[in-house]
Image (spheres, rainbow, N blue to C red):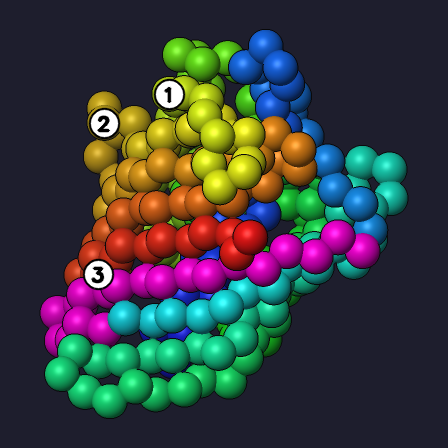
């Protein structure tokens, strides 16, 4: 169950990442989606704890339920969830659904899933991607301040996003954004990774990331990869 919670939460977080690119390599701080839009992604996560090592794989379907003014309602359905402990058999898990209500600037207003009431604390999770307040071009960066979470014992921290390039990837014109914790702030949940942002929709079409979790006696390391199915 812990594996399923972690995987579903990471997948739900990354599927709502995005910034909208413009021809001068800058950013416009908003999603550009239309009600009825549908996208399919494939995700793979490897996790290592003190007790076990395992992988989780799934297909993820992102549906835009509504797009009204500056607000979106997005549903992510994780299907074909396969959980495999190292050296063991594959276990097929039931599908899960995560619904996110957010503004086009990335601010999450509400998040619900069928696994954990803790999903409502998304704003205090470092995976909560936030858009730059002003356009950012290749070579530029912006920071996201993540509030402290007393329940987890995590201090206030900063995630830095660096626009390292622009390229064509599988037919998508993408901006390449690297992200990592501010190294000057010690945190029990370090992370780093790279995401490709589609200029047409503002969605992350590819993400690879590495996380650790050392809160409340946990000792977890995880690598995560997500990519859109074209």
In the rendered image of this protein, does residue 230 appear above or below residue 118?
above
Whether 177 is among the magenta residues is no
Q: Residue at x 44, y 77 (%)?
A: 81
Spatial CA span between label 2 and label 3? 19 Å
Q: Along the polypeptide, which appears first: circle 2 or circle 3?
A: 2
Residue under numbered circle 2:
183
In the image, which disc is placed on residue 164?
Answer: 1
Image: 210 above or below 157: below
Identify which residue, 13 or 22, lies in the foreground.
Answer: 22
- Residue 185 position in % (x across, y down): 26, 29
Residue 95, relative to residue 218: is it above or below?
below
Q: Position of residue 56 (x, y in %)?
A: 34, 71
Q: Is residue 103 left or right of residue 24?
A: right
Q: What percent of the width, then of the height, locates residue 22? A: 64, 18
Which dot, 3 or 1, sits closer to the camera? Answer: 1
Q: Is residue 90 left or right of residue 121?
A: left
The main secondary structure of the magenta stretch is strand
Across and down, in percent, residue 219 comes to 18, 61
Where does the magenta region start and end?
A: 36-54
Please state which of residues 214 and 178 is positioned toward the viewer in this rendering. Answer: 178
Cα separation, mark 3 vs mark 1, equals 29 Å
The mark found on residue 220 in the picture is: 3
**Which image quadrant is residue 192 in?**
top left
At 22% from the left and 80% from the top, the residue drawn is 85
Dot 1 crowding, Cα within 10 Å, few <14, some 14–19, many 20+: some
In the image, 93 versus 103, the foreground residue is 93
């Amino acid at each position: 169950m812990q594996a399923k919670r972690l995987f579903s939460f990471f997948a739900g977080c990354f599927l709502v990442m995005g910034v909208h690119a413009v021809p001068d390599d800058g950013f416009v701080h908003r999603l550009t989606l239309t009600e009825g839009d549908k996208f399919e992604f494939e995700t793979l996560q490897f996790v290592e704890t003190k007790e076990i090592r395992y992988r989780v794989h799934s297909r993820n379907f992102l549906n835009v339920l509504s797009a009204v003014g500056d607000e979106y309602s997005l549903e992510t359905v994780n299907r074909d969830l396969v959980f495999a402990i190292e050296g063991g058999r594959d276990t097929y898990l039931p599908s899960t659904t995560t619904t996110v209500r957010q503004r086009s600037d990335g601010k999450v207003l509400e998040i619900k899933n069928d696994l954990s009431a803790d999903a409502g604390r998304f704003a205090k999770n470092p995976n909560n991607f936030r858009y730059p307040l002003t356009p950012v071009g290749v070579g530029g960066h912006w920071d996201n301040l993540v509030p402290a979470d007393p329940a987890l014992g995590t201090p206030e921290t900063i995630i830095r996003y660096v626009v390292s390039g622009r390229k064509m990837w599988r037919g998508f014109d993408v901006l390449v954004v690297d992200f990592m914790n501010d190294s000057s702030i010690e945190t029990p949940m370090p992370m780093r990774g790279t995401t490709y942002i589609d200029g047409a929709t503002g969605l992350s079409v590819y993400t690879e990331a590495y996380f650790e979790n050392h809160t409340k006696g946990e000792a977890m390391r995880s690598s995560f990869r997500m990519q859109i199915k074209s």
